Image (spheres, rainbow, N blue to C red):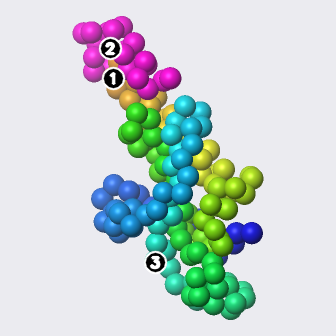
């Protein structure tokens, strides 16, 4: 069963070079369609030292010996290849990172709910901006936008 050593930490992708560097070395673990969005789960290297994060020193030994994978979880929601929302969770320790996805009602499910909610909000905001800025073409432009993003 998976273990989490620390609380979730929020990271902002825009302008954060450390996060961008991490994503370049991330590994795609799972892709699925949920609520009309493509949901991708990646593992990224965890910068936090596991020493002092666990009650049992054997957990740190398992990480050091490669029996447990120590990573940051990254879940993103996209539509038409455009990433609309991303969520991060550091300090994840699992024998197999795919178990992070398999845990019913776990952190992965929460992260999916969050990125889907945020992605819908982004689309709602884009839709409002699109209608405001494209008042000359009106209905045709709105229909095109809705066809692309609200499937």
Does residue 54 appear left or right of residue 27 in this picture?
Answer: right
Q: Residue 16 shows which numbered tag?
A: none
Q: Nearer the viewer, mark 3 or mark 1?
A: 3
| Residue identified by numbered label 3 | 47
Q: Residue at x 35, y 63 (%)?
A: 24
Marks 3/1: CA distance?
40 Å
Does residue 127 appear left or right of residue 50 in this picture?
Answer: left
| Residue identified by numbered label 1 | 130
Q: Can you say whether 16 is above or below 71 in the image? A: above
Q: Is residue 91 magenta?
A: no
Q: Main secondary structure of the magenta part?
A: helix
Q: Check whether the beta carbons of the residues at disc 2 and disc 1 lie within 8 A of each other.
A: yes
Q: Residue at x 50, y 23 (%)?
A: 151
User: Helix, strand or loop at disc 1?
Assistant: helix
Mark 2 vs 1, N-terminal side? 1
Marks 2/1: CA distance?
8 Å
Q: Is residue 147 magenta?
A: yes
Q: Residue at x 60, y 52 (%)?
A: 111
Mark 2 vs 3, N-terminal side? 3
Mark 3 vs 1, N-terminal side? 3
| Residue identified by numbered label 2 | 141
Dot 3, how many residues are within 10 Å of its Cα: few (below 14), some (14-19), or many (20+)?
few
User: Helix, strand or loop at disc 2?
Assistant: helix
For the record, the magenta segment spans 132-151
Count of numbered badges drawn on the protein = 3
């Amino acid at each position: 069963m998976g273990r989490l050593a620390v609380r979730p930490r929020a990271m902002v992708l825009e302008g954060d070079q450390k996060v961008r560097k991490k994503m370049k070395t991330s590994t795609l673990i799972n892709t699925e369609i949920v609520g009309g969005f493509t949901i991708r789960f990646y593992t990224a290297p965890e910068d936090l030292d596991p020493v002092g994060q666990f009650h049992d020193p054997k957990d740190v030994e398992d990480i050091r010996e490669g029996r447990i994978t120590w990573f940051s979880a990254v879940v993103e929601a996209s539509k038409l290849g455009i990433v609309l929302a991303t969520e991060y969770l550091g300090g994840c320790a699992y024998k197999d990172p795919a178990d992070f996805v398999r845990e019913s009602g776990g952190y992965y499910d929460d992260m999916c709910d969050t990125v889907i909610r945020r992605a819908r909000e982004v689309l709602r905001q884009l839709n409002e901006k699109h209608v405001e800025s494209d008042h000359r073409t009106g209905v045709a432009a709105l229909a095109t936008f809705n066809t692309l993003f609200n499937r």
